[in-house]
Amino acid sequence: MKINQLSLFLENKPGHLSGVCRALADAGVNILTLSLADTQQFGILRLIVPDWKQAKQVLEKAGSVVNVTEVVATEVEDRPGGLADVLEIINAAGLNIEYMYAFTFRRGDRAVLVFRFNDPDAAVQALQAKGVNVVGEVELYERDNG
Amino acid sequence: MAEFAFENRIFDPAETMPRDELAALQAERLRQTVERVSGVPFYREAFAKAGVTVDDIRTPDDVRRLPMTTKADLREHYPLGFLAVPREQVVRFHGSSGTTGRPTFVAYTKQDRELWADLCARFLVAGGLRPEHTVHIAFGYGLFTGGFGLHYGVERVGAAVVPAASGNTRRQIMLIRDLGAQVLVCTPSYALNIAEVARAEGVDPTSLPLQFAHFGGEPWTEDMRTQIEREMGLIAMNNYGLSEVIGPGVSGECAARRGMHIQEDHFLVECLDPQTLEPVADGELGELVFTALTKQAFPLLRYRTRDLASLDPSTCPCGRTGVRMSRIVGRSDDMLIIRGVNVFPSQIEEALLRVEGTAPHYLLEVARPGAMDELTVHVEVRPEFFSDKMSRMQELRERIGQEIRSVTGIGAKVNLVEPQTLERSTGKAKRVLDHRKGE
């Protein structure tokens, strides 16, 4: 139930982010969601795309350093306390969140968040045991197409 | 065998001459050299001024009575003021690239060129070259002495040469693979470039037929040797030379790999404090100064190389008696003085290589925005140590900064940059940008 995230190293300079996005656009790659962590000097761009293997090739050909990381996409109820409930489950299972960000789409009254755990398998197990819906790759791409 | 990385073989019995015989030979050859250069106006005037004659030369140590020669002297007597034979005896000219000013030229007679081939053959055989090998030479074949010197040496040994010259790395990889070269000759930074391009092309560098590499042309480090040997699956050997002395062939490593044996029957070496010009103790860092003992066309007395190294006269298990010089750790004129501390680019390289996975592609930028010097080290990020976690990347930067501080004693700003954005070169890499000098 894990999904693959691409991350790449970016210098914090004008034009570097747009260059990456243009390379993906030219290859017809749609970005499902992204997050950018930055310092004054450099940034780390994290991307979820439908075909990560193709996107990785495109980015590497454009000269980027690209990593693939397993992350967990989780449904969270879109109401006050929805995120707090999920975080408490994670906390109770003794799991650490490295970082998290959201998808732009939602399903009914639920938002979808991306979590980066040190131990994604344990996280999937803990979340599913408490009835939290973990969204797989197939389902994500269906949403993208629908 | 344990003390050797491979079979120890000696090309010329002269390499094992007992030290007392060697000293007598050096003294005799030094006297001949003094007579030979008496026709060069620069030396004639210097001898007259110091009141030195050939009768003052009795032992090799008497070289200290002779005048020194610098790069500036060569420029001042441009182009051929140091030529010691009639012009018609010259069969070849070579020269320096002139990156730091006017180029300088050197000349060879037929005898000099034969000697050059012999000396290169000596260090190549010491470094594992055998007649059945094929050698891929990726040095430039121009005025630079690297390409031709190694070429002659390989031919003298009786091995096959692929004179690939520099440039077009993909084609080089194809040639190495298709012609089955066991031996690579280039600069160490170019070897890393070959490995990088091979990987990008989907070729595992260790799958290439290469077994040995002979590196020269630029300073490098022991950590870099480890990295190249691991990445390319070969034995990397070091050799040293400079056009003003003869080109490659001044010294080279043997199978024991504990320093480069200087070919002392042809070159007299001194290791001097660059400020006082007094000899330093064995094992201490000093500037290497060479006197050519047998060259005909262009024999320089006490040429100041600006290269900093140390000498080790202890006995070597390989049987060669020539004193061993360490790697070049820097140049007395490349030395950066940052906030009063002497810093060499090679130290930064050492620090970077200590941080796991960091390839030696870097640039030092020195500026003085206010009253204080500032050092910024730009380092290319490699896939092996890139992480999606910001905390890891910050740690990496800090670790690089700490290693630089521990090696050089000064703090530096570390700037991580995208891969393939710093300048690459097949010759000498541009490692320093000093804004204090208007660069």
Image (tube, helix red, strand yellow):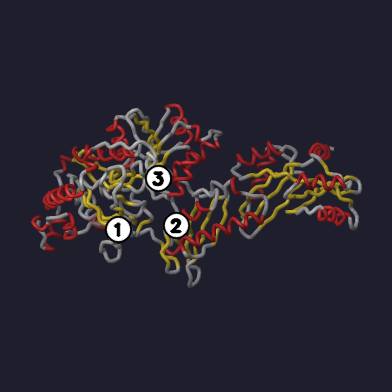
The disc label shown at residue B282, or none:
1
Secondary structure under badge 1? loop
Residue drawn 72% across and 50% down? A118
Chain under disc 3: B
- Residue B357 appears left or right of B429: right
* Separation (CA) of disc 3 from disc 2: 20 Å
The mark closer to the camera, 3 or 2, is: 2
Mark 1 and mark 3 in contact? Answer it, CB < 8 Å: no
The disc label shown at residue B427, or none:
3
Quadrant location, the N terminus of chain B: top left
Secondary structure under badge 2? helix
Dot 2 crowding, Cα within 10 Å, few <14, some 14–19, many 20+: some
> Could you tell which of marks 3 and 2 lies nearer the N-terminus?
2
Q: Amino acid at mark 3?
A: Gly
Residue nearest the observer in this picture, B47 or B343: B343
Give residue B383's position: percent from left, percent from top. 59, 45
Q: Amino acid at mark 1?
A: Asp
> Could you tell which of marks 1 and 3 lies nearer the N-terminus?
1
The mark closer to the camera, 1 or 3, is: 1
**In the picture, residue B248 is in which quadrant?**
top left
Dot 3 crowding, Cα within 10 Å, few <14, some 14–19, many 20+: some
* Separation (CA) of disc 1 from disc 3: 31 Å
- Residue B186 appears left or right of A146: left
**In the picture, residue B320 is in which quadrant?**
top left
Chain under disc 2: B
Residue B286 position (above or below residue B316): below
Secondary structure under badge 3? loop
Give residue A120's position: percent from left, percent from top. 76, 46
Q: Amino acid at mark 2?
A: Gln
Which residue in the rendered view is the most extreme toward the bottom? B371
Which residue in the rendered view is the most extreme toward the front? B2
